[in-house]
Image: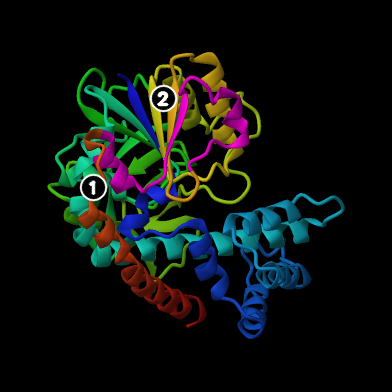
Amino acid sequence: MNRGLLLGAGFSYDLGMPLSVEFTEVFLGIFNKENVKLLAAALSQNDPYSSGRPINKEAVFNGFDLLLEYKKNKGNNYEEFLRIIQDKQNELGLSQSDKDSYNYLFSVFYEIVHTILSAYQKLSYETIYKKNIRWFSGLDNLLSDKETWVFTLNHDLYMECLALDYGIPITYGDDESISFPLSNIEMDKKVNLTCSKRSRLASSDAGFFRGERGINLVKLHGGLSELQYQDNEILCNLPLNCKSSNELITNFKQLENMAYYHQGQKVPSGKDRCITGSDGELDIISKSMLTGGRKYSKTSKIKKGEEKLKIFDEQLMKLDELTIIGYGFGDKHVNFRLSNAMLLNENLTIRIVDPVNCKPPEILEQFDFDSRIRGASCGAAHWMDYCVSEKWGSEQINTLKENIKYRDIIKSKVEAAIMAGVFN
């Protein structure tokens, strides 16, 4: 049987990563009426584009008013708020200065979101991962005998960590490599990455497994450790030839320390990161994380930059079974592709694994016949065991319930780290 996986935030829940609602609490919790005024005033003094394109103080303050209003109305999806800021950029009648201001604000919020996720990645690994990894030992039960395509909407590194620790071959499909100095004051320290040219990214690439056991991992929304180089033409990733997850996370921390220094001071970065090129000069590499309301275009026609979606489309046509874990069906570009695949691939069945809602969304209801869509009211780790044994493990269930106290610890540490970073 040809199996595939589609992973949402719920897959990484028992490894310490936040669900969307939890993440939004942390993100919105950073801001209040007092500190927003200070932050808005400080940002208004910046000149992010050029001396000839000043940003608008009024627009910056209005953007933060929108944030406080969203918080007051108990908004629970940070991506919905980011979409509001993105939509402001396209309002009719706005001056270029206003558009620049909202674009700048989005970049500020983007950086905060990325920083929160990065903090969660490191703190959850230190706090929960080693306690719970044994409950994910059944990952192999979800895979095909040959290659398995895994499509993830998450930005974290936990599929990679699990594969490394359980000896499952895994690849991003990269078939080239590149390296950078850690910084221009530590030229002897190198950061090694694998890479692929975006224009050639395809399921037929030599870097992907074909006819042999292994995970072909495609991060549809980018990732914390995925970077874009040379005007986004080259996708760079951390090498996956590590001995263990510990080595991968160590390399991830080093990746985040890449920098360029001017007169002894680290040059600040945002979505576009200032790093050091092989010649010791300033270079730029970009974060790949997709968030907000413009992850992909609204049509089914594949455009430049949507190569990963093309791979997703192609593989859905070949699968017999797709297991969807922890996905809330909130992304239209994913949903209509699932619906199209169910219509065109009569052999495709879907298993929805979610402890809260495993019922098919409206877009898939028409295919809910002859067991083409089935549900499982449980988490990722529980399903890995149950799908083979058809028995629930009481020890596993009770142990994973204890995660709540550890998740609270992680959340508190993340909040403290972010507040210190944003306002100090």
Please tell me which residue is depicted at 24% across the width and 66% down the height of the picture: 126
The picture places residue 10, in percent across and down from the top left corner, at: 41, 50
Q: In the image, 308: left or right of 210? A: right
Q: Which residue is mark 1?
A: 136
Compared with residue 64, is residue 172 higher up or lower down, i.e. above or below? Answer: above
Secondary structure state at the residue bearing disc 2: helix
Q: Which residue is mark 2?
A: 200
Picture coordinates of residue 109, whole percent (x, y): 57, 63
Badge 2 crowding class, 10 Å Cα cut-off, few under 14, some 14 to 19, many 20 or more, is few
User: Magenta span has 418?
Assistant: no
Q: Assign the N terminus to one quadrant of the image.
A: top left
423 vs 145: above or below = below
- Stretch of the chain drawn in magenta: 358-387
x 52%, y 22%: residue: 369
Kindly identify the amino acid type of the residue bearing the numbered disc 1: Phe
In the image, 6: left or right of 360? Answer: left
Give, as a three-letter code, the residue at label 2: Arg
Q: Where residue 177 is drawn, which disc sits there?
A: none
Magenta stretch: includes residue 368? yes
Q: Is residue 232 above or below residue 247?
A: above
Residue furthest toward the right? 93
Is any atom of residue 278 visible in this view?
Answer: no
Closer to the camera in the image, 212 or 384: 384
Which color scheme is applied?
A: rainbow
**Camera-side residue of 422 and 277:** 422
Q: Residue at x 46, y 59 (%)?
A: 114
Q: Looking at the image, do the residues carrying marks 2 and 1 touch, with CB atoms under 8 Å apart?
A: no
The x and y percentages for residue 357 are: 50, 46
Tag in front: 2 or 1: 1
As measured in the structure, the alpha-carbon distance from the residue carrying label 2 to the one carrying label 1 is 34 Å
Res 160 → quadrant: top left
Where disc 1 sits, the SS reads: helix
